[in-house]
Image (spheres, grey):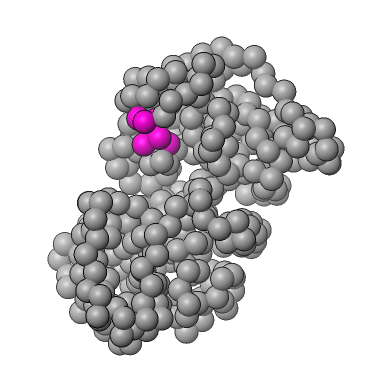
């Protein structure tokens, strides 16, 4: 079968199209015939520092496809099921940039008959990260769903990114008031398409003033892509018992926070990395994202504010480069082509 592998860390050029034997699932594992592989920033970042084993590493954590083999101890009813995959390559050699991949059975989630494989491949890291960011505040519930965030306001910094888009869609599904910041009119259109109630162009508008107009007492949660740049704004708009959830270090690796002001609010500044988040939080995230998909509440494509950029398997290096260059939308690999 065709698979993308790399045997040393480096740039996109280390990714090579190879011919590998079709893997067999071991006990507790399933094999998935992959339809689409999702590319995330962590995929290219880990590629630059990883130390692959002697057989190389197949990249990419997220994907979708059909279960075509199961290992010992796995319910045979999984055979033929359409699924989405999370954390395929986390501390394992088999990612989703291959015609088939093998993962623990718990790392595949039923997709159902109707949702597209493109949506399935876009769920994993972005939506689970967004779920965690929306549920870490003490003032908010740890589950999302219709009515869960009624009366609450969420600020999504960087509403046109993949995690930002997921956060807007999940918060909208949960009936929050959603404010999103963007850097251009085109990105403003995307954030609005995702479901943001208010969109602020931080290049042209005063974010603090605009947010305080909507949420006079401050917001309950901030989904933060660039804490080093936005900490000053976040500190001025976070509400009592709210949380600033920092899931990336875009724009800088260190954050300065006004301690006394945040103490008065009992605010929480929470670091978020989906791979190492508490198991219960991740399990709840998987359940809630699955429910949102079944409800038809989340989507991909221009209509959902998340343009798709699709590459064939042989162009995985170009797909990684696109993400590294900051492509607006979601980068997918069509493994069947």
Give the position of the N terminus as an image quadrant.
Answer: top right
* Residue segment shown in magenta: 43-49
Residue 81 placement, left or right of 316: right
Residue 308 placement, left or right of 280: left
At x 17%, y 70%, the residue is: 205
Establish if 52 lies above or below 139: above
| Between 227 and 191, the one nearer to me in the picture | 227
Establish if 287 lies above or below 93: below
At x 30%, y 51%, the residue is: 249
At x 32%, y 42%, the residue is: 327
Count of numbered circles on the image: 0
Query: Percent from the top left, x then y, of residue 173?
Result: 53, 69
Q: Residue furthest left?
A: 204
| Between 294 and 104, the one nearer to me in the picture | 104
Query: Percent from the top left, x then y, of residue 70?
Result: 78, 32
Quarter holding residue 19: top right
Residue 152 placement, left or right of 144: left
**Residue 199 part of the magenta-drawn span:** no
Query: Percent from the top left, x then y, of residue 316?
Result: 43, 26
Residue 176, can we see it? yes
Residue 171, can we see it? no
């Amino acid at each position: 079968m065709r698979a993308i592998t790399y045997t040393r860390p480096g740039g996109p050029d280390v990714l090579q199209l190879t011919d590998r034997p079709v893997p067999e699932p071991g006990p507790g594992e399933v094999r998935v015939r992959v339809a689409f592989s999702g590319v995330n920033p962590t995929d290219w970042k880990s590629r630059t520092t990883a130390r692959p084993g002697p057989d190389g590493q197949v990249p990419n954590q997220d994907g979708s496809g059909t279960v075509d083999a199961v290992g010992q101890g796995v319910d045979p009813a999984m055979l033929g099921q359409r699924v989405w995959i999370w954390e395929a390559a986390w501390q394992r050699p088999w990612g989703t940039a291959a015609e088939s991949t093998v993962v623990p059975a718990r790392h595949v989630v039923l997709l159902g008959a109707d949702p597209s494989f493109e949506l399935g491949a876009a769920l994993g890291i972005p939506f689970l990260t967004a779920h965690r960011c929306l549920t870490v505040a003490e003032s908010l519930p740890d589950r999302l769903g219709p009515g869960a965030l009624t009366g609450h306001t969420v600020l999504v910094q960087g509403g046109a990114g993949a995690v930002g888009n997921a956060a807007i869609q999940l918060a909208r599904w949960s009936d929050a008031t959603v404010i999103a910041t963007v850097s251009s009119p085109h990105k403003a259109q995307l954030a609005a398409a995702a479901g943001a109630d208010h969109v602020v162009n931080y290049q042209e508008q005063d974010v603090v003033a605009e947010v305080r107009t909507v949420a006079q007492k401050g917001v309950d949660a901030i989904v933060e892509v660039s804490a080093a740049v936005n900490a000053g704004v976040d500190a001025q708009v976070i509400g009592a018992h709210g949380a600033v959830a920092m899931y990336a270090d875009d724009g800088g690796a260190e954050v300065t926070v006004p301690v006394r002001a945040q103490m008065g609010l009992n605010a929480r500044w929470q670091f978020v990395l989906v791979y190492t988040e508490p198991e219960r939080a991740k399990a709840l995230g998987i359940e809630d994202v699955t429910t949102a998909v079944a409800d038809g509440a989340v989507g991909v494509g221009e209509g959902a504010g998340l343009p798709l950029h699709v590459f064939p398997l042989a162009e995985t290096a170009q797909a990684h480069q696109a993400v590294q260059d900051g492509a607006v939308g979601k980068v997918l690999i069509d493994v069947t082509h």
